[in-house]
């Protein structure tokens, strides 16, 4: 009796087995990565340092603290100091950290980050019209495997807070609650000024209310540090950004355009490219009138590309984009496959050769580029908005 083999079914099962094994391996790497990072304070230490210096009436953007995070890559003989380079409003929150044990506060913040991520995921799931799609279980395991999630928890960074705010603003804008959407977007811009490009993308689509409200909100919030410390606080922030950013550009996981071109020793080309892309974005949106999801995708991804520093944790901000798509196309899958590669693998690979230095050093940037390019190419496809 001749047995017929359904090759399509066999291949489908094979893909699922490979995916399951890969995810299990990646989860093990990520869990070990975070569990073994108990001997340092990382970026969280820089936040503590900034708050302590402010409490001591010193320059909160100076390097006069042993808590400030620094790292050295021996193979490429490169070192960088990573103090708090968030805008001055952040210091008012970091001042409260100095009254708590650094190690205990970092552990607490890591657990809180995990809870905030789960809450953000559930919020997106609840407000996405396509959240109950058949493959949502598979997507959930992929989302929780994002390198940006685990790296954010390890560093003690604030990207999950930014993710939550991004989701809230996204939902409000989608529901045409322009006042609330603009206020939340303004808070994001005050924390991460590069997201002014998201507001500009909305303005290019004549959504001037969100643009105006976000601008007023971010400006108002940004005035608060001046009332407390005077204009000098912004001078100190800008001086620190100019001093420390150049050494950080070629760090692995910096997925900005400046980060890419800095690997060829021409970071200024990255700035020029960002300006050109911003102009092209405005023209494209004004001319084509794309869907809301396309506009938000362009705004969010370009906000990362144009920023001098766009660490791995920023890739979490593509969650609303991926949630809104009812059916992932090939470019979605390729981008996600890039985003879930654990950061420890990138750390091992990026120093091994000149090619690796560029390709793996900017690894998650390729995922952002693929996501943006695919969205633009498929702008006429029916999308959920």
Image (spheres, helix red, strand yellow):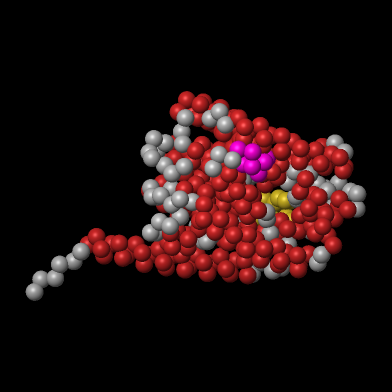
Q: Is residue 340 left or right of residue 45?
A: left
Vertical relation: 288 (above or below) 306: above
Residue 223 pos. (x, y %): 80, 38
Q: Which residue shows up at 58% across the image and 56% down it?
A: 120
Of residues 229 and 84, the one drawn nearer to the viewer in this rendering: 229
Q: Is residue 181 in the magenta section?
A: yes
- Quarter of the view holding residue 102: bottom right
Q: How many marks?
A: 0
Residue 283 pos. (x, y %): 51, 26
Q: Is residue 64 left or right of residue 324?
A: right
Residue 311 seen by the camera: no
Instruction: State whether the magenta stretch is mostly helix, strand or loop.
Output: helix
Of residues 266 and 369, the one drawn nearer to the viewer in this rendering: 369
Residue 3 seen by the camera: yes
Of residues 159 and 264, the one drawn nearer to the viewer in this rendering: 159
Q: Is residue 22 in the magenta section?
A: no
Q: Which residue shows up at 10% across the image and 71% down it?
A: 2
Residue 247 pos. (x, y %): 69, 45
Q: Which residue shows up at 67% across the image and 41% down it?
A: 183
Query: Quadrant location of the N terminus?
Result: bottom left
Vertical relation: 311 (above or below) 279: below
Of residues 51 and 171, the one drawn nearer to the viewer in this rendering: 171
- Quarter of the view holding residue 6: bottom left
Q: Is residue 334 left or right of residue 62?
A: left
Residue 294 pos. (x, y %): 48, 38
Q: Residue furthest left?
A: 1
Q: What's drawn in magenta, residue-wise? A: 178-186
Q: Which residue shows up at 76% across the image and 54% down it?
A: 47
- Quarter of the view holding residue 95: bottom right
């Amino acid at each position: 009796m001749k047995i017929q083999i359904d090759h399509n079914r066999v291949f489908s099962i094979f893909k699922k087995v490979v995916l399951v094994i890969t995810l299990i391996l990646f989860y093990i790497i990520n869990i070990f990565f975070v569990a073994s990072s108990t001997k340092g304070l990382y970026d969280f230490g820089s936040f503590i340092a900034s708050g302590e210096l402010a409490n001591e009436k010193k320059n909160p953007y100076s390097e006069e603290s042993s808590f400030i995070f620094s790292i050295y890559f021996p193979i490429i003989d490169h070192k960088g100091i990573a103090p708090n380079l968030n805008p001055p409003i952040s210091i008012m929150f970091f001042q409260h950290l100095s009254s708590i044990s650094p190690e205990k506060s970092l552990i607490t913040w890591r657990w809180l980050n995990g809870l905030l991520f789960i809450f953000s995921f559930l919020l997106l799931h609840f407000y996405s019209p396509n959240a109950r799609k058949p493959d949502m279980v598979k997507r959930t395991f992929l989302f929780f495997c994002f390198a940006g999630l685990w790296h954010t928890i390890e560093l003690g960074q604030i990207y999950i807070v930014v993710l939550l705010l991004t989701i809230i603003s996204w939902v409000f804008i989608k529901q045409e609650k322009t006042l609330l959407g603009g206020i939340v977007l303004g808070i994001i811009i005050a924390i991460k000024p590069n997201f002014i490009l998201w507001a500009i993308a909305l303005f290019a689509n004549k959504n001037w209310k969100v643009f105006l409200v976000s601008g007023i909100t971010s400006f108002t919030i940004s005035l608060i540090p001046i009332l407390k410390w005077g204009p000098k606080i912004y001078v100190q922030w800008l001086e620190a950004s100019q001093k420390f950013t150049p050494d950080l550009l070629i760090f692995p996981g910096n997925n900005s355009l400046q980060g890419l071109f800095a690997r060829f020793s021409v970071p200024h080309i990255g700035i020029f490219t960002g300006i050109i892309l911003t102009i092209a974005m405005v023209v494209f949106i004004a001319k084509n009138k794309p869907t809301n999801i396309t506009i938000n995708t362009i705004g969010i991804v370009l906000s990362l590309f144009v920023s001098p520093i766009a660490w791995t944790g920023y890739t979490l901000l593509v969650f609303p984009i991926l949630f809104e798509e009812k059916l992932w196309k090939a470019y979605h899958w390729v981008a996600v496959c890039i985003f879930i590669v654990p950061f420890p693998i990138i750390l091992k690979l990026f120093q091994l050769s000149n090619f690796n230095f560029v390709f793996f050093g900017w690894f998650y940037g390729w995922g952002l580029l693929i996501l943006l390019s695919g969205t633009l190419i498929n702008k006429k496809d029916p999308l959920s908005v």
